[in-house]
Image (tube, rainbow, N blue to C red):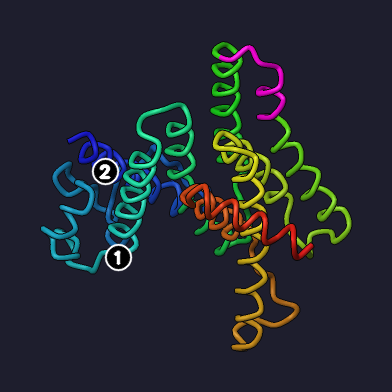
Amino acid sequence: MISLYVFFFGLIFGSFSNVLALRTHIGKSVVFPGSECPQCQKALAWYENIPVISFIALKGRCRSCRNRISFIYPLGELFCGALFLAIYTKFELSLASILFFSIAVFTAPYIYIDVKIHRLPNLFTLVLAVIELGVFGIKMYQDQSFENLTGLLRDPITALIIFGVIYVVTGSKGMGMGDVKLAPVLAFAAGLIGWKTTAAYLILSFYTAGLISVGLLLSKKASRKSRIPFGPFLLLGFWIAVFLSDSQIQWLVSFWQVKH
């Protein structure tokens, strides 16, 4: 039963996630006006705004102007709902899961905006950083072990150094400052599971970016001069690492160590 509630809350936050994705990059308030049809701008009644259900009931069309509603809305809601459920299934309701829920809400907006305008909103990263400060404070209160607390800081600092060096060496050609800011935030979250999860997240981020970039070049969907956003790969690598089993993490890290 709790799983059902978690999934439903995921759908609700998925609806908010859609708003963040579609409004933030054009400088539009996420609060006012309320939900409206993107075609006729008519305000939606509460029963037209129920995640997924309203889309199905309205057969994918606006009740007022009858224009089609983009599938991005129900897909965004289902994506967030599925992430919430997967997080709860693995971590139950815990300090780590609360942070992962927060990252889940921003995942689709991060990806959509980075692909659209090649930016990762500072506000999103700041909100996550503040939540992480709260998590660190609670951890510091619960666990007086200096070694464990420094371990939590080691991962984001390491990620910041790695991405900072890449940014300085390559400039904005390699990655943007938004990537440099997001990388340590995700590293802190991954570090709640363990340093090997953080290592796997970083490895997977670079590997997936490399593979997909090569694929785009070979298919001629991108050229050497094309700007390929790195943010989506950070998030892809992060979520894959989070849901890998301990044995899979161990294999990946060991494989990377052998190759390097």
Q: Amino acid at mark 2?
A: Phe
**What residue sits 23% from the left and 42% below the top?**
8
Q: Please tell me the numbered disc located at residue 197.
A: none
Q: Which residue is found at the position 31% from the left and 57% from the top?
A: 73
Q: Is residue 252 above or below residue 225?
A: above
- Front residue of this view, candidates 14 and 256: 256
Label 1 element class: loop
Rendering quarter of residue 94: top left
Looking at the picture, how far across and down is residue 34, in whole percent? 31, 41
Task: Judge depth for marks 2 and 1 and give the one in front.
Answer: 2
Left or right, 196 with respect to 245, comes to right
Residue 25 appearing in the image:
no
Marks 2 and 1: CB-CB under 8 Å?
A: no
Instruction: Return the residue at label 2.
Output: 7
> Is 260 positioned to the left or the right of 210 in the image?
right
Q: Which residues are magenta?
A: 143-152
Residue 198 screen position, x and y as percent:
63, 45
Q: Main secondary structure of the magenta part?
A: helix
Question: What's the CA distance linking mark 2 and mark 1?
Answer: 19 Å
**Rendered-image quadrant of the N terminus:** top left
Amino acid beneath label 1: Phe
Q: x, y percentage for residue 135? A: 54, 24
Q: In the picture, which quadrant includes the C terminus?
A: bottom right
Q: Secondary structure at mark 2?
A: helix
Which numbered disc covers residue 71?
1
Picture coordinates of residue 145, whole percent (x, y)? 66, 16
Q: Residue furthest left?
A: 57
